[in-house]
Amino acid sequence: MLPWTTYDAMYDAALHQPEQFWLDAAQRVTWKHTPRIACQTRADGWHDWFPGATLNTCYNAVDRHVQHGRGAQAALIWHSCATKERRIVTYRELRDRVAGFAGGLCALGVEKGDRVLIAMPTMIETAIAMLACARIGAVHVVVFAGYAGPELARRIDDVAPKVMMIASCSFQGQTATPSTPALNAALAQATHRPQACIIVQRDACSAPLVPMRDHDFHALERSPPVAPLMLRSQDPLYILHTSGTTGTSKGIVRDNGGHAVALALSMALIYGCKAGDTFFTTSDLGWVVGHSYGVYAPLISGCTSVIVEGAVSSAAIRTLCRDHAVTCLFTTPTQMRLMRQENRNLPEQAPPALARVFVAGEYADPTVMDWARAYFRTPVVNHWWQTETGWSITAHFFGLPEPEPITL
């Protein structure tokens, strides 16, 4: 439950009692050492969130839900638009796989603060790799799986990873594209040399392992499991590069404590979701929406997260929403335009019974928003944020009891 019942009450608390506002928000997260200070200004003008507090983001996203009786609940539901595979992983299964893979990373020498570069499509294994890094305090750097050698080499030199990992192939539509040529080209061009490479073997296209360099992902998963390492709130969780559309791409560093608190608060306050609800984002895990609302926010909140590989069709969205009783759909205006076009060209399809729909990432023109509200017969809301913020800058608040306007 949120401590406010109206927008005005929330606004007043945030404006006039910001320290207590964020200490109250921090109670949504499980801490080893509970924060006593919400935000502290450093000598260099930057700020530390919840200094002195310790936690582990992976524990908050996975282990604690198993301990609280949600082990049999679906944590991740994955659908591949390329291979038509669908997999469901429960919280207990996710904990065991993450703990084992974290042990595999430790066996390769990965330690707290080391960077792990992940160049993989949206897969269960991608989420496992992210969470395993969070479990041991390594900093994951997820990049677009389709990068060619030169672009991948630039990312390698930018973050100097101790380990990097790829899938044996990615897909363009339904065509498998081997990933090892880009990996080999990147390693030949980069000045930094990772100590090891990890490869997820896929049925569509396996990759030969280079002796003394490459390791099989699923073999590493069978390593002795490791427990979550307690980290300082301000320790880095991940680095995520901006798109570079306004200049040179920048690596955004996200901390553990402030990130966990913000995302846990957002699920309740902005999206109106609670533990047990199902949240579906169509974003690739390589983008900030995939990080924040494909993996971390839903799992920290005890929800089920639906993630998809590839460009998802409107029909697949409807099917996934119906099959898995999706509460909230988070997609793009472009996806709404495609759905509108499909409805014009095919017999009208009944919309899934969603509680609400959110769009972000690009301009949402009023005509497509009006169509979406009429089609879904539920709130369809545009909200805005960016890689640098990690969560919404402007949004409606569906977690508050007072009604929200749905036409803006």
Image (spheres, helix red, strand yellow):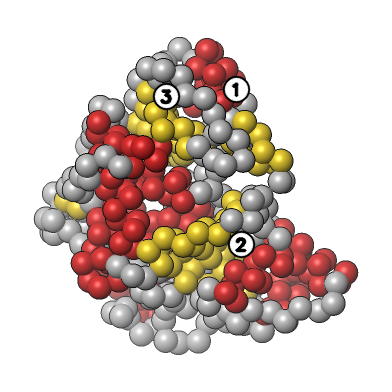
The quadrant the C terminus occupies is bottom right
The crowding category of the residue bearing disc 1, from other C-alpha atoms within 10 Å (few below 14, some 14 to 19, many at least 20), is few
Q: Residue 362: x and y, percent?
A: 66, 55
**Which residue carries the number 2 mark?**
331
Closer-to-camera residue (284/97)? 97
Q: CA distance from mark 2 to mark 3?
A: 36 Å
Q: Residue 395: x and y, percent?
A: 51, 67
Q: Residue furthest bottom?
A: 402
The crowding category of the residue bearing disc 3, from other C-alpha atoms within 10 Å (few below 14, some 14 to 19, many at least 20), is some
Question: Could you tell whether 178 is left or right of 5 in the image?
Answer: right
What's the residue type where badge 3 is placed? Asp
- Report which quarter residue 405 is drawn in: bottom right
Q: Residue at x 60, y 35 (%)?
A: 205
Where is 333 relative to 321, above or below? above
Secondary structure found at label 2: strand
Secondary structure found at label 1: helix
Q: Residue at x 58, y 30 (%)?
A: 179
Identify the disc placed on residue 214: 3
Q: Residue 352: x and y, percent?
A: 64, 79
Residue 243, visible in the rendered structure: no
Disc 1 or 2, which lies upstream in sequence?
Answer: 1
Q: From the viewer's perspective, is the residue at label 2 or at label 3 nearer?
A: 3
Query: Residues at badges 1 and 3 in contact (C-beta under 8 Å)?
Result: no
Q: CA distance from mark 1 to mark 2?
A: 32 Å
